[in-house]
Amino acid sequence: MKRVADHLSDVLAAVHPLPPLELQLLDAHGCVLAEDVKAQWPLPPFDNSAMDGYAVRRDDVAGAAEDRPVLLPVLGDVPAGADGDAVIEEGQCVRIMTGAPLPGGADAVVPVEWTDGGVGEVAIRRGPGPGQYVRHRAEDVEAGDVVLEAGMHLGAPQIGLLAAVGRDQVLVRARPRAVVLSTGSELVEPGQRPSGGQICDSNSYTLTSAAKEAGALVFRVGAVPDDSRQLMATIEDQLIRADLVITSGGVSVGAYDTVKEVLSTLGTVHFDKVAMQPGMPQGFGTVGEDRIPIFTLPGNPVSAFVSFEVFVRPAIRKMLGVARLHRPGVRARMVEPLRSPPGKRQFARARYEPGPDGDTVTPLGGQGSHLVGDLAHANAFVVVPEQVTDVAAGDVVDVMLLERRRG
Ligand code: AMP
Ligand code: MG
């Protein structure tokens, strides 16, 4: 049997980051930046008001107090979007709005709350400190600064920053396009009522969601029956839009295990027994002229999901060009004992809880690879190494976290 680590390194050696391309800003959301982005102009681009109030010369209002307000004539209004040509002389002010350019001659802003709100003349009851309520040009970003570096993941604030510095397109790594298909003549679409012997195709939904969460652009093809010709035709049809293909089912030793039967004749896809539980039968290789990587995962829903997490997710992450391929690992104390088969690496679904007296992890229910009810409540896998067969309550174990740590 092949070790998990060896299978993973074979998979990772065979996939590569996709070439960069220019995308419209919103299409680049979730992608990895492939250029250093410089600011074309400073942020803020000009001195402007942080408050609705009055732009003043600080010296004019230095003596203002509740019982001794300073009265100033108001030259007019400067709203956000004004051209910035306004100027005030000694003893004058303008009414100014948040984000509006500070007039020449002004050096501070008095918030409207410190005044009587006058329009022709204003009574100011308090003087601002030096530069108060002014947002200074370039205090955030200087023109020419590298604001985002190649390799960064573009989340919401990064997309916003690109927009703020005027970029409508950006060079990013393409998101890998993943085609997901299920195989099995017993499968029907959710929404259809399964008749005797049929079940709903859940794997293509799990794997589509998981691939999306990993950062791929996913095309879900429904279930294909266990029929060699139909399976091969479907895979060939899909290759045009695939950077990787993920199938589930049909890879063990049953008489109708079509995926294995069809793809093993190509010679480019290898079927291995990987020493893990669940998920032992794994196929990986390439298909088509463009040698598109294909993962043929086992059909049992838990096996399919574990296999995705252990092998496919890191591959998608590598294709995306991100540095962190793997789920975060932590150590936690087992609440209950757990048995693990000798010679196999076990990925036991579990509930991980951070706690003030140390983090704990509790295996969930049975570990049968058809038990999807428990899987849906797991937030982690306990990873039991090959040589370990018994984990006692209280033992500290390796945990692979499936969701971001909370709290
Ligand atoms: P197989 O690997 O095709 O022999 O499938 C193993 C088990 O997983 C069988 O009980 C299948 O019915 C089940 N199975 C296979 N594919 C799916 C799927 N897409 N959704 C739900 N269960 C599946
Ligand atoms: Mg099957």
Image: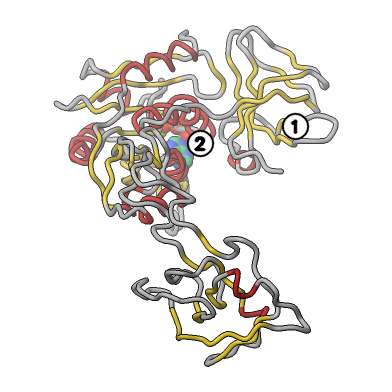
- Mark 1 neighbour class, 10 Å CA radius: few under 14, some 14 to 19, many 20 or more: many
Q: Earlier in the sequence, mark 1 or mark 2?
A: 2
The reply, left or right, for residue 245 in relation to residue 306 is: left
Residue 179: where, in percent of width, then height?
31, 40
Residue 38: where, in percent of width, then height?
33, 42
Q: From the viewer's perspective, is residue 399 above or below residue 120?
A: above
Q: Are marks 1 and 2 in contact (CB under 8 Å)?
A: no
Residue type at mark 2 is Pro
The reply, left or right, for residue 179 in relation to residue 297 is: left
Residue 396: where, in percent of width, then height?
76, 19
Q: Which residue is mark 2?
A: 301
Asked if the residue at label 2 sits under 8 Å from ligand 1, the reply is yes
Residue type at mark 1 is Thr
Quadrant assignment, res 66: bottom right
Point 75% across, 35% down: residue: 354
Q: Secondary structure at mark 2?
A: helix
Residue 208, label in figure: none
- Nearest the viewer among 87 and 207 is 87
